Amino acid sequence: MAAGNSDSQVPDWCEIAERASRESDPKKLIQLVRALCDRLQEAELRKKRRADPESLSPSNSGLAKPPAA
């Protein structure tokens, strides 16, 4: 698994893509492509969250706004 991967239990998208490029079993290839899509979507969501820190996330969606002065 990749050293720069924050989630050491799940291979990063580059590793999944490399495995998919070598896979000849159609069923295994489908599984790898689905895993690749999932990882890329997760990366895109993380990128959007870093770019927009004001966006609502599940951790702060229930918080009330402070009263206006």
Image (cartoon, grey):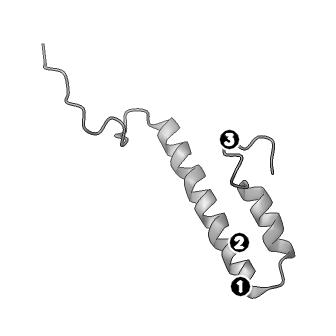
Q: Point out residue 65 in the picture as x, y percentages from the top left corner.
A: 20, 27
Amino acid at pointer 3: Ser
Residue 18 shown left or right of residue 52 in the figure: right
Identify the residue at horizontal 71%, vertical 46% (top origin). Answer: 8
Residue to which mark 3 is pinned? 6
Identify the residue at horizontal 67%, vertical 75% (top origin). Answer: 31
For marks 1 and 3 on the same chain, the one whose residue lies earlier in the sequence:
3
Identify the residue at horizontal 77%, vertical 57% (top origin). Answer: 14
Residue to which mark 2 is pinned? 32
- Residue placed farthest to the right in the image? 22
- The local secondary structure at tag 3 comes to loop
Amino acid at pointer 1: Lys
Crowd tier of the residue under label 2, counting other residues whose Cα lies within 10 Å: few below 14, some 14–19, many 20 or above: many
Q: Point out residue 54 in the picture as x, y percentages from the top left corner.
A: 37, 33
Instruction: State whether residue 7 is above or below residue 27.
Output: above
- The local secondary structure at tag 2 comes to helix
Q: Distance between the residues labelled 1 and 2?
A: 9 Å
Residue to which mark 1 is pinned? 27
For marks 3 and 2 on the same chain, the one whose residue lies earlier in the sequence:
3
Amino acid at pointer 2: Leu
- Quarter the C terminus occupies: top left
Q: Point out residue 35 in the picture as x, y percentages from the top left corner.
A: 65, 66
Contact (CB < 8 A) between labels 1 and 2? Answer: no
Instruction: State whether residue 68 is above or below residue 29.
Output: above
Q: How far apart are marks 3 and 2 (CA)?
A: 20 Å
Q: Please tell me which residue lies in front, 1 or 61.
A: 1
Crowd tier of the residue under label 3, counting other residues whose Cα lies within 10 Å: few below 14, some 14–19, many 20 or above: few
Q: Point out residue 22 in the picture as x, y percentages from the top left corner.
A: 87, 74
Identify the residue at horizontal 51%, vertical 49% (top origin). Answer: 45
Residue 67 shown left or right of residue 35 in the figure: left
Crowd tier of the residue under label 1, counting other residues whose Cα lies within 10 Å: few below 14, some 14–19, many 20 or above: few
- Residue placed farthest to the bottom in the image? 26
